[in-house]
Every structure is written in C-alpha cells, then in structure tokens.
Image: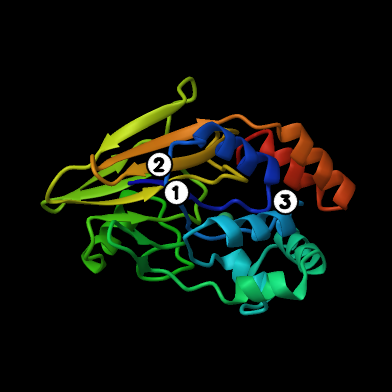
Amino acid sequence: MQILILSDIHANWYALEAVLTEAKGQYDQIVCCGDLVGYNPHPAQVVDWTQKNCSSVIRGNHDKVVAGLEDLSWFNETAQTAARWTIDHLTAAQISYLAGLSEGPKTNEYFELVHGSPNDEDEYITNSSEAATCFPHVDVPLTFFGHTHHQGGFFSKRGNIGTVAAVKKKQRESVVQLEVDTKYMINPGSVGQPRDGDVRAAYALYDTDRKLVTLRRTMYPIALTSSDIQKAGLPELLGARLFHGF
Ligand code: ZN
C-alpha cells in the first residue's frame, strides 16, 4: 500500500494541484494532518477536495478557529484577518465539515496522525528535546505530524533521539528507510505555506510494505497564489512570505 501524506494545505490550491500532479499514480489513498484552511485564498476548493479524496483527516488549529471551536484571539492579527475572510468564503456545509474533523491522534493499521504532537494537538514539535518528551506517549512505530510547517522529523532508538532531515534544496526527494525497534515522528512539511526556507510545496509518500517514507518537494506557481491573495483582499504579507518560504 502506498499512502500520500499531506499537511497544512492552508487553502493553497495551486500548491495542492502541483503535489497531486507530481504524485499521480503513486498512491492508493491520501491522509491529511490538518490545517486545510487559513492564510491562503482557496478554502472552499481545498475543503471540497479533501472531503472527497482523503481517507483520513484530523483537524488543525486553523480548522478549529474557522469552525468556531476555538477563539480567534489565539491568532496574530494577520492570521485573524485570514480566518475571518475564510469564514466568509465557506458555506455552512463546508464549515460543518471542518467542525466535524476528529482531534488527533488518529491511528490506523500503519501509523498515527497528529496535528501538533501526540500529547496536544496545538503543541509545536520543533526540536529533539521536544520530540523526546513525546516518544514515551506513542505506542506506534510511526507518527506523522504537522503544525510547524517544517519538513523532517525525529526518531527514537534505544533512548537516543535522532533527526530526519528535510529534502535538500537542489534535490526533489529523500527516502527514509524505517528500522525495527525505532519510533519515528515525521512531518511531511506544509503543502501550502512552507516555513523551512524552501518555497516548494512539501509532502510525503509512505510505502507500507517496504517501510519507506519518501519526503518530496515540488515547485508550484507561487505567483498565482500570491496574485489571488491580493485579489481576495487578504493581507499582502501572506503572498510575500510564500516567495521566501517562511
Ligand atoms: Zn498550519
């Protein structure tokens, strides 16, 4: 079984489209670690596509805010403006789909999905010491997470914590062979708003038979998303940051 793992699409349709074009024919099902909406201008398209195409989805903090499950005041001003705009551009049915998304962790026979961390859906795992506090709470060998918009992750083997690197800038993919007696927490990276200094859309594929995680980066027409951000009247900063990858 080949599984496409997406996270933090954040209403960037052109980025999602580029990922799907590149990965076409290479997966049997799609899962998503949350944050379908927020920041970018295509929330309705992304929500409809996710509902139709993903076999397993958990909610992110932006999905919660847009669904009215969490207060806007947790966000900075730009994110608040984008969340209000998003609410105005979704139908009641689309908002109710977001409201109904499950909280992570969500486990299947192959791995677990979380948005932030296995302990707390809103917690950021950004370094090895934060990851070290999470591993004792996971019972499965493989967890996919999102939220930081940084591709890569961590592993724990006999009490030692190591890191999984993102795809290098001049490369298109990197492959992680999962080892026995090792737990992994891997972030596929953000499809719609990468913040790890690489502007390309990020995603991962998991080969459940060979136990291979392939991290990928793919270029998409950033100028189109940025121009739609401008046309939508969303904060210009949201378009500018896509060209810098942070
Ligand atoms: Zn996010």
**Position of 170 compared to 200: left or right?**
left
In front here: 100 or 172? 100
Give the residue at mark 2. Answer: 205
Comparing labels 3 and 2, the label whose residue is closer to the camera = 2
Give the mark nearer the N terminus: 3 vs 1: 1
Residue 188 position within the rendered picture, expressed as x and y whole percent measured from the top left? 44, 45
Q: Are marks 3 and 1 in contact (CB under 8 Å)?
A: no
Quadrant assignment for the C terminus = top right
Image height of 128 relative to 15, above or below: below
The residue most toward the top is 170
Question: What SS does tag 3 mark?
Answer: loop
**Position of 59 compared to 215: left or right?**
right
Residue at (67, 78) in percent of width and height: 68
Q: Which mark is residue 40?
A: 3
Residue 67 position within the rendered picture, expressed as x and y whole percent measured from the top left? 66, 74
Residue at (69, 62) in percent of width and height: 76
Q: Which mark is residue 93?
A: none
Disc 1 marks a residue whose amino acid type is: Ile
Q: CA distance from mark 3 to mark 1?
A: 20 Å
Give the residue at mark 1. Answer: 5
Q: Are marks 2 and 1 in contact (CB under 8 Å)?
A: yes
Disc 2 marks a residue whose amino acid type is: Leu
In front here: 82 or 12? 12
* Residue 134 seen in render: yes
**Position of 30 compared to 45: left or right?**
left
| The residue carrying mark 3 has its beta carbon less than 8 Å from ligand 1 | no
Image height of 9 relative to 102, above or below: above
Residue 177 position within the rendered picture, expressed as x and y whole percent measured from the top left? 24, 37
Give the mark nearer the N terminus: 2 vs 1: 1
Packing grade of label 3 (10 A; few <14, some 14-19, many >=20) is: many
In front here: 129 or 158? 158
Disc 3 marks a residue whose amino acid type is: Asn
